[in-house]
Amino acid sequence: MTGERAIEAVRGNWTRRAAAYDDFYRHYPEDKRAAWKSVCDKALRAAFPHRQEPLRVLDVGTGTGFLSTLVAELGHEVTAVDPTAAMLGHAREAADRRGVDIRFEECGGHDVTRLGTEFDLVTSRYVLWTLPEPVRALLAWRQVLRPDGAVLLADGVWHTWGMDARRALNSLKPGADHGFLRRLARDYAQIGRATPNWQGLTAEKAEKLLRAGGFEVGEWFDPLLPDYARPVSASFFLCTARIS
């Protein structure tokens, strides 16, 4: 599956999952959220050590607004985009709850050039692995960045046979999430063939994609990630990248 059919399949999948994601992040512990805020603040200060004024930030694939609201709380000017109206609805509610001002636009990660705006920073948390054409998306992100701009990328490995088998066994225990296998089969059927990175991204794979998209990795911040920022395995990473 390629092209617009793949993009539509991915959009449809996340539209169906929007309510569940919103429920998850409404109950996300504040101490864990604070840990994410701290690591992002440190990464941004390292990427822009002499910057005094707020950054103009584009949060791609904002989902229910976890990262966009966090970055806005750090004092930056945020535009948040997502291809699904359902996700954006929840993200707007999250911004209202947290008292931050964010510009929201319905826009896919491949199409950000139509925003017609230049940014200092593009952020992407657990998004690149889902994109049917990740290099095309990265090239678009490069176009909307100022010459001294940067990308802040968080991603990781989401599906391997071993990981999914362990989660499936755990789902059979009393009181566990018995719908896991059904959702896994549904998600794979809907987007497993639509994205080339269904299993997720290792740091090495992400670096290759970034280079193909016109970026060079600047710094890795993996040691700063708390254990609970690694929801599936230890193979999660956070890095900045600059236009090459």
Image (cartoon, rainbow, N blue to C red):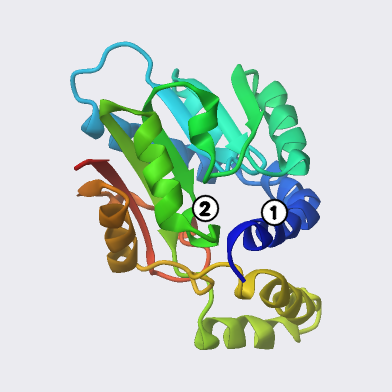
Instruction: Identify the residue shown where x is 28% and y is 49%.
Output: 221
Front-most of 183 and 36? 183
Position of 16 compared to 214: left or right? right
To which quarter of the image does residue 209 belong? Answer: bottom left
Residue visible at 41% across and 35% down? 122
Mark 1 Cα shell of 10 Å, populated few (<14), some (14-19), many (≥20): some
- Residue that mark 2 sits on: 127
Q: Do the residues labelled 2 and 1 touch (CB within 8 Å)?
A: no
Q: In this view, does 220 lie above or below 26?
A: below
Tag 2 secondary structure? loop
Q: Which circle's residue, 2 or 1, is located before the other in the chain?
A: 1
Kind of residue indicated by mark 2: Val
Left or right of 40 on screen, residue 125 = right
Q: In this view, does 151 lie above or below 103?
A: below
Query: Could you classify mark 2 by the number of other residues whose Cα lies within 10 Å: few (under 14), some (14-19), or many (20 or more)?
Result: some
Q: Which of the two residues, 118 or 36, is positioned nearer the viewer here?
A: 118
Tell me if I can see residue 38 in this picture: no
- The residue at which mark 1 appears reads as 11
In the picture provided, is 231 more to the left or to the right than 123?
Answer: right
Q: Of the numbered discs in the image, which one, if any, rests on residue 233?
A: none
Answer whether residue 147 is visible to the viewer in this image: yes
In this rendering, which labeled residue sits more in front, label 2 or label 1? 1
In screen coordinates, is 131 left or right of 104?
left
Q: Where is residue 81 in the image (x, y as percent from the top left)?
A: 59, 35
Q: Helix or strand or loop: what does disc 1 sit on?
A: helix
Amino acid residing under circle 1: Arg
Percent of width and height locating residue 200: 47, 68
Between residues 81 and 31, which one lies in front from this camera angle?
81
> To which quarter of the image does residue 6 belong?
bottom right
Is residue 5 shown above or below 137?
below
- Residue 58 appears at what percent x and percent y? 47, 30
For the residues labelled 2 and 1, the Cα–Cα distance comes to 12 Å
